[in-house]
Image (tube, rainbow, N blue to C red):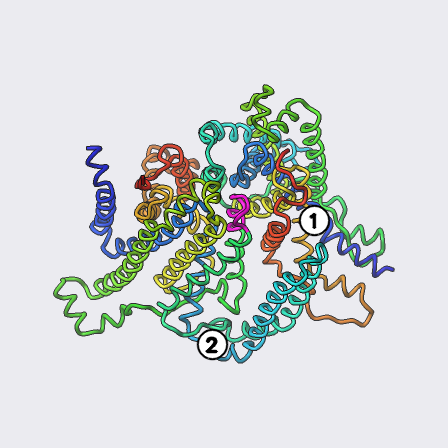
Amino acid sequence: MPAFYQQYRNQILFSVMAGLLVLVAIMQSLSVSLTILNLCLISAIMALGVNIQWGYAGLFNVGVMGFAALGGLAGVLISMPPVSEAWQAGGLGILLGLLITVGTVVACLFAWTRISHLKKQRYWIIAAIIICGYALLRIFFDPGVDAIEAIDPSVTGYLGGLGLPILVAWPVGALFAAGVAFVIGKIALGLRSDYLAIATLGISEIIIFFIKNEEWLTRGVKNVNGLPRPVPYEIDLQQAQWFQEWAITLGMPVDDASAVFVKICYALLFIAVIGILLWLSETALKSPWGRMMRAIRDNETAAAAMGKDVTWQHLRVFVLGSAVIGLAGAMLTTLDGQFTPVGYNPLRFTFLIWVMVIIGGSGNNWGAVLGGFFIWFFWIEAEPIGLWLIETLTSGMDPQSAVRAHLLEGAAHMRLMTVGIILLLTLRYAPEGLIPEKKRL
Amino acid sequence: MTDFLNALTLLGNFLIIPGLTYGSQLALGALGVTLVYGVLRFSNFGHGETMAFGAMVTILVTWGLQSLGISIQPLPTALLAIPVGIAVTVLLTLLIDRFVYRYHRERKANPVIFLIVSIGVMFFLGGLIRFIIGPGDQIFFDGTRFILKAREFKQMTGLDEGLSLKMTQAVTIITAVMIVAAMFWFLNHTRTGKSMRAYSDNENLALLSGINPDRVVMITWILVAALATIAGTLYGLDKSFKPFVYMQLLLPIFASAIVGGVGNPIGAIAGGYVIAFSELILTFAYKKVVLYLGPESMEIESLVQFLGTDYKIAVSFIILVIVLIIKPTGLFSGKTI
């Protein structure tokens, strides 16, 4: 049996996963099962992104949430129709602000290279440039922001997007995340490994604060609803002649059939993306580049001695992984059809993804995908299971007792504790994960 | 002259006293992070939750004392409960070390693995805290609220601006000074403290000279638990106790430790104040100060604020980035205790 398991491990594990989803489809409903499947697919893509950074290169990114939020932001900025009054009211101020920011950065870089002979003074010069630039920025930017936020705040109050199809937002989300990752990587890579963790933790918090507070761009906590879809709307399907006939032949009510149809469309789109990504990652891992990355991960000093530029390769792989996470973030907003900045919390978007990678098997792309499926499935189903468990355990107690009420109330926090315990147990007893990295000779 | 004094009082009330208080809390937190880094050589992401745990135990004991009618007016009862909080937290950290960290330490695991393990511990503790005390806001402050009231100060000096000093602020600053002094005395003048510094400086050499590594690790966790409990309780007394806030404190605490130079206790304390004052200076609205200092007829519309208060968290990050670019070893470069 163990030999059989060893040989067909991937097939067995993925069949178990499929079986679980089928079980949910039978016990709850097909629609619920498909909802879980779609989020599993997105989680798997995020896990792939983290695996590129951690599994290929040993980089510890604690800012997954920030990169995913950037992808989500791209969804809004690309797909929502532009608000022309807002552009007229404050567009000029915003554009001037952007110009000033770019100008300040260019001036800083220029000054930095030109005055390298001045040792201490150049910090003061750079600081002076930044302060002047910031003051200028505030003078032009603030009135623009106020004007934009004043326009019909309950409906718009922001600049809107470009009004392009939302599928365009997916690569753009990846680009956003890659851009921020490049800056962070430039600063924190090449220093001690914990600095990257702390820097990414910081930047992800700041991205979320930015998105919540800069209402002229994102509507902040007021959320952006009604993002356009890449797939048909249920209501259109229900009125279409062909769909009604099709639903009758399947023997399903038209409402249910339309919901299921839309979810299947999403699932197919996501499977296509995950297929392409998996193919690319596997090819990259087998290529000479993948060999070099593993060499760097396993022994940085030796790789550096062989003439590999470790920091530069780390930067590349960090940017690539973040881009994949940004892509997944954009896909998530597409699926939700709305952008809700308050929804981003580090537990759900950073640490859960990490648990997926570690449990799935770091360094193995299939492992990351499987981890994404398993962990998301249990994350969704853990709450009912936990509640049921506590209820059963305390059923002998007096229903009015305060202890029982407290325990039932606390059941919601069991998820947090369970995630922690699972992580600790995996790291100790199965550090390789469900699907270990292939041993290569 | 009065205008100048008014402006000064205004700054004192809203900038200097809060800065000293917040800085002391950060310094105590950063000291714990730096100790773990110096001796155990990893960045402890679980520190925020350890602080929350210590504060939680202290709160529970405080409630118990309050229901028994024990108090130490005018000081808050929580001060009486802190020793119990420390004892329980010490027990917790030692248990965690025994069952979680020791295994990885014996295998000489990579620091990044320790980091991930500490994140697991963070979740576990976070869940435990929310399970025991709930995610809500807890107020456990009692005793006299103000040592110096703004109104009294105005009457005393005849100025338009008042200077107030809250009991919690005074308690925080004084406790922090005492703890830091005791800490340095311990590290520099006792045999155990010296052995800790030696171990942190050069592990192999320390082992050769017969220092017991298990004992050093144990003492470190005891100190870390004590510092975390005190920092957590002081923060909870001053603001209020909310479990999720302690996770958000993690970034400023790490920033303080790194700005000062990770592994360097003096650096951690300096870093705490640097971060606290930068946060307040950059997000303070200087409108009234400018009005006092400027000419009589001056009128300004804006708040004269560098950054919105919402971006407080960004300040510690910006400082962190500047330090990483200019001097990655921190202000007081050093990796040893």
Query: Which range is magenta?
Result: A188-201
Residue A192 part of the magenta-drawn span: yes
Q: Secondary structure at mark 2?
A: loop
- Which amino acid is tagged 1? Gly
Identify which residue is drawn at 49% across, 66% down.
Answer: A218
Residue B215 percent coordinates (x, y) = 56, 23
Residue A43 percent coordinates (x, y) = 35, 52
Q: Is residue B87 left or right of residue A417?
A: right
Residue B123 part of the magenta-drawn span: no
Q: Secondary structure at mark 1?
A: helix
> Is residue A410 shown to the viewer in this render?
no
Identify which residue is drawn at 72% across, 38% down.
Answer: B174
Q: Residue furthest top?
A: B210
On whether disc 1 and disc 2 are found on a single subunit, the reply is no
Q: Gap in Å between the C-alphas at discs 1 and 2?
A: 43 Å
Q: Nearer the viewer, residue B152 or A383?
A: A383
Q: Is residue B166 left or right of residue A262?
A: right
Q: Nearer the viewer, residue B211 or B3?
A: B211
Label 2 Cα crowd, 10 Å radius (few <14 / some 14-19 / many 20+): some
Checking the image for residue B132, the label placed there is: none
Identify the residue position indicated by label 1 in the image. B19
Q: Nearer the viewer, residue A295 or A174?
A: A295
Specify the quadrant of the image occupied by residue B171. top right
Chain under callout 2: A
Q: Is residue B327 left or right of residue A181?
A: right
Q: Nearer the viewer, residue A338 or A127?
A: A127
Identify the residue position indicated by label 2 in the image. A83
- Which amino acid is tagged 2? Val
